[in-house]
Amino acid sequence: MTNSISTRLAVLGSGPAGYTAAIYAARAGMNPIVIQGIQPGGQLTTTTDVENYPGFRDVIQGPWLMEEMQAQAEHVGTKVVWDHVSAVDLSRRPFRLTGDSGTIYVADALVIATGAQAKWLGMPSEEHMKGKGASACATCDGFFYRGKKVAVIGGGNTAVEEALYLTNHSHDVTLIHRRDSLRAEKILQDRLFAHPNIKVVWDSEVAEFVSGGEPEALVGLDIRNKRTGELSRIDVEGAFVAIGHTPATELFADQLTLDSEGYIEVEAGTTRTNIAGVFACGDVMDKIYRQAVTAAGTGCMAALDAEKFLAAQEYEAIAAE
């Protein structure tokens, strides 16, 4: 027999956006259910040092922060479920979500906080050096490399923006791009080329992340010129992969309006999607900031938007009687 759980509000995803939405929703009496997904806690569970989340003077650990957010959400009345939703039906209310466990979740409103994953190069040495010098977020981790030589890998807007940002901390920034021209907007390219602390390595790709020292850390990158095949090494202590992100929106592709990059589109200044009662927050709809604190902020917005929606639905139902 299929297990069915009904709720006023279901939250898909358990990162800062999802848990913040749940905290606000629970405090508003909506008795939300958080369905954690395949990566409970989101990307912060793979992040060690967190130094820029407000309220903490000392460096904190990403997994610890997410454990605290979950505990707070549960404390105020959220039910947290470990399951992965593999199918959704948003064609009518209440919405129906099918979990891998076989459970059907029936919700009057839905907050989508499934996040986005950074794209990596997919190299064993890159994987080995994650957290030891290899990063996918200069805004998150650039401060740890102040005064050190760093590199950015990519050629689009994100890569150029990250290279420019890193000049706040480093006097020696190298941008590595596999082509002979950048894809970034011209105004960003102009700023990049005019900056005295940034140099560009063209027609090149990273062949190896080089480790060394004790404790082990990144000490350099082996670079292969794509035209000549020649290998060279640059000495860096931080390498930032900036080749884009993939939002977790496959479930909603045929039901919600997505932009050209697959992010959920929301009404400006809100978290409302094109389907009434469905709200999106965090990195699944934000391709610009992608910070834990901004994700939490939009999670709060989603809960408030959902509360207003459900209140209006209840008022209309009473008025119709």
Image: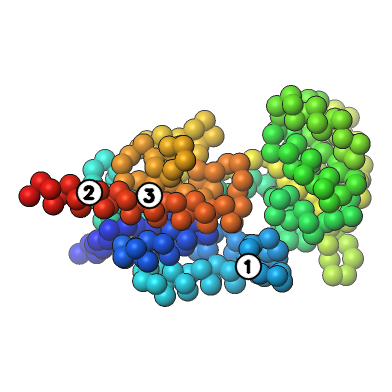
In this rendering, position of residue 61 left or right of residue 155: left
Instruction: Quickly name the residue at label 3.
Output: 305
Q: Which mark is residue 73?
A: none
The image shows residue 169, relative to residue 15, as above or below, that is above
- Which quadrant does the N terminus fall into? bottom left
Q: Residues within 10 Å of mark 3 (few under 14, many from 20)?
A: many
The image shows residue 30, relative to residue 286, as above or below, that is below
In this rendering, position of residue 105 left or right of residue 19: left
Q: Locate residue 50: give its quadrant.
A: bottom right
**First-in-chain label (2 vs 1):** 1
Element under disc 1 = loop
Q: Residues within 10 Å of mark 2 (few under 14, many from 20)?
A: some
In this rendering, position of residue 57 left or right of residue 98: right
**First-in-chain label (2 vs 3):** 3
**First-in-chain label (3 vs 1):** 1
Three-letter residue code for mark 2: Gln
Instruction: Quickly name the residue at label 2.
Output: 313
Q: Distance of mark 3 from mark 1, alpha carbons?
A: 26 Å
Residue 194 can be seen, yes or no: yes
Three-letter residue code for mark 1: Gly
Instruction: Quickly name the residue at label 1.
Output: 55
Residue 214, percent from left and from top: 88, 70
Q: Distance of mark 2 from mark 3, alpha carbons?
A: 12 Å
Q: Residue at x 31, y 41 (%)?
A: 276
